């Protein structure tokens, strides 16, 4: 399972890459807005920090303009993945870009029917938003299960990228279902490390070690 981080904060990404667990990055217009920085500069910096795919999202809503924005974003770095929304224009753009050899992430997916369209359009990634479905009282992870099942019936190359992740439980469920990628807010990645018994056990080991008066180096 690959881990992407869902942030446009360059300093956070730099710190997380040091862990050796970051396989890629996803951004969206809201995350760029939160960073308060220029989009092209930010994406360029992130692409220099991470070898894997870095999703940069178009903001046009019509196909021709999406293609023009995608051309600009693709020119930033070789590891830019173009993110398009799951609309008719987005799917048309996904097909055209994928046919041209670009990596495309189709975002704002909330149904299995939408995920089938993205796969047929040659998307490298489909991004179903689990947390936003949970917020409405629908089970987001059921959608992941459905998409993984459907894709496994065919020769689709599209990877299931679990997005809108809100807790470590989403990640564990996604892994159980065989989702290819989870994009994690840095907070959730941090939460995955935590267990009170780890802290308690480590403290006991350190206390006992101190009593021995020894030192390894
Ligand atoms: O990058 C898209 C996605 O992960 C958004 O998450 O928390 O805004 O629903 P959220």
Image: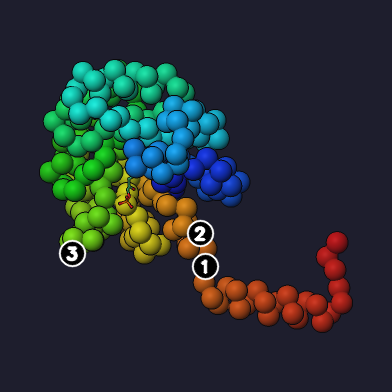
Q: Which mark is residue 137?
A: 3
Q: Quadrant of the C terminus?
A: bottom right
Q: Is mark 3 within 8 Å of ligand 1?
A: no
Any part of residue 83 in sight: yes
The residue carrying mark 2 is 190
Q: Are marks 1 and 2 in contact (CB under 8 Å)?
A: yes
Separation of marks 1 and 2 at Cα, in angstroms: 7 Å
For the residue labelled by badge 3, is the local secondary structure a helix, a strand or a loop? loop
Q: How dense is the environment of label 2, judged by Cα within 10 Å: few (below 14), some, or many (20 and up)?
A: few
Within 10 Å of the Cα at label 1, are there few (<14), some (14-19), or many (20+) other Cα atoms? few
First reached walking from the N terminus: tag 1 or tag 3: 3
Counting from the top left corner in percent of width and height, residue 119 is at: 21, 35
Residue shown at the point (34%, 42%) measured from the top left: 30
Q: Nearer the viewer, mark 1 or mark 3?
A: 3
Q: Say which residue label 1 marks.
A: 194
Q: Position of residue 7 (x, y in %)?
A: 43, 45
On the image, the x and y values in percent for residue 136 come to 18, 60
| Residue at x-position 87% and y-position 77% | 213
């Amino acid at each position: 399972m690959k881990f992407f981080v869902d942030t446009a904060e360059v300093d956070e990404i730099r710190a997380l890459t040091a862990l050796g667990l970051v396989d890629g990055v996803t951004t969206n217009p809201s995350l760029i807005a939160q960073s308060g920085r220029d989009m092209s500069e930010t994406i360029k910096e992130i692409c220099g920090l991470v070898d894997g795919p870095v999703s940069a999202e178009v903001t046009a809503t019509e196909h021709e303009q999406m293609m023009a924005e995608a051309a600009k974003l693709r020119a930033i770095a070789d590891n830019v993945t173009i993110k398009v929304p799951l609309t008719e224009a987005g799917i048309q753009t996904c097909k055209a870009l994928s046919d041209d050899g670009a990596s495309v992430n189709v975002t704002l997916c909330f149904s299995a029917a939408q995920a089938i369209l993205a796969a047929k359009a040659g998307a490298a990634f489909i991004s179903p938003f689990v947390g936003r479905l949970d917020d409405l009282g629908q089970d987001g992870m059921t959608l992941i299960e459905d998409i993984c099942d459907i894709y496994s019936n065919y020769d689709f190359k599209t990877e299931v990228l679990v997005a809108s992740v809100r807790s470590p439980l989403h990640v564990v469920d996604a892994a159980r279902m065989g989702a290819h990628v989870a994009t994690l807010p840095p907070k959730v990645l941090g939460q995955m490390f935590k267990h009170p018994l780890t802290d308690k056990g480590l403290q006991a080991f350190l206390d006992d070690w101190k009593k021995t008066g020894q030192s390894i180096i």
